[in-house]
Image (cartoon, rainbow, N blue to C red):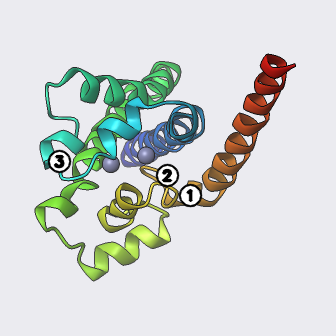
Amino acid sequence: MAEVNWQVGASAIAIAWLLLFLGDFLSTFCYHVPEHVFGRLHLQTHHSSKKTFRHYAVLSPKREVLLDGILGALPYLLMAAILWHFSPGGVLLGLVFGQFHVWWRHTSILGWQTPQAIDWVCRICWITTPEQHWQHHQKTNLAFGDIFACFDLPARNWLRWLRWLRLQVRSVSFAEKSG
Ligand SMILES: [Zn+2]
Ligand SMILES: [Zn+2]
């Protein structure tokens, strides 16, 4: 009996991790980075300076803030729907941790400093700390990966490639107009 409980717990944790990892992957590469290159909503809401904790942590009722939050969260909800069949408990665990992380990663503005031991655990597990996420708020080309810091490097390469693509599209349309 104890072994069955252990297995249920381990599979719930694995599903929670999968939900967060794939959700963050899709959110970073399909919404966050493209939005930095082609959009305005995220840059205007999430990167506008001197906002409050409530604003950054999507606790503000403002329409644009909520829309940016919902679009960023859609991949997690998609993964939740796919993984529900395997472990409803794991899905709920993943969603609760994901929501906790949204609030936690914005606590730098409240003066929070991550204790060394937690910082150490986060680095081993590739989990983005509030300090790392705050770098992204200040320098928009850095520190991608809302939950997992390992997405930062590939996301920056994706950002550079999308910017190059945008330049090509613009130069083609400019040549068409002037030709
Ligand atoms: Zn943020
Ligand atoms: Zn951003």
Of pointers 2 and 1, the one earlier in the residue sequence: 2
The residue depicted at 48 percent of the width and 72 percent of the height is 124
- Within 10 angstroms of label 2, few (less than 14), some, or many (20 or more) residues? many
According to the image, label 3 marks what residue? 51
Q: Amino acid at mark 1?
A: Asp
Image quadrant of residue 166?
top right
Q: Secondary structure at mark 1?
A: helix
Q: Quadrant of the N terminus?
A: top left
Residue drawn at (52%, 57%) of the image? 141
**Is 32 on the left or on the right of 163, as rendered?**
left
First in sequence, mark 2 or 3: give its number.
3
Query: From the viewer's perspective, is 78 left or right of 59?
Result: right
Asked whether mark 2 and ligand 2 are closer than 8 Å, the reply comes as no
Marks 2 and 3, how far apart in space? Answer: 21 Å
In front of the other: label 1 or label 3? Answer: 3
The residue that label 1 is drawn on is: 152
Q: Earlier in the sequence, mark 1 or mark 3?
A: 3
Disc 3 residue type (three-letter): Lys
Q: Quadrant of the C terminus?
A: top right
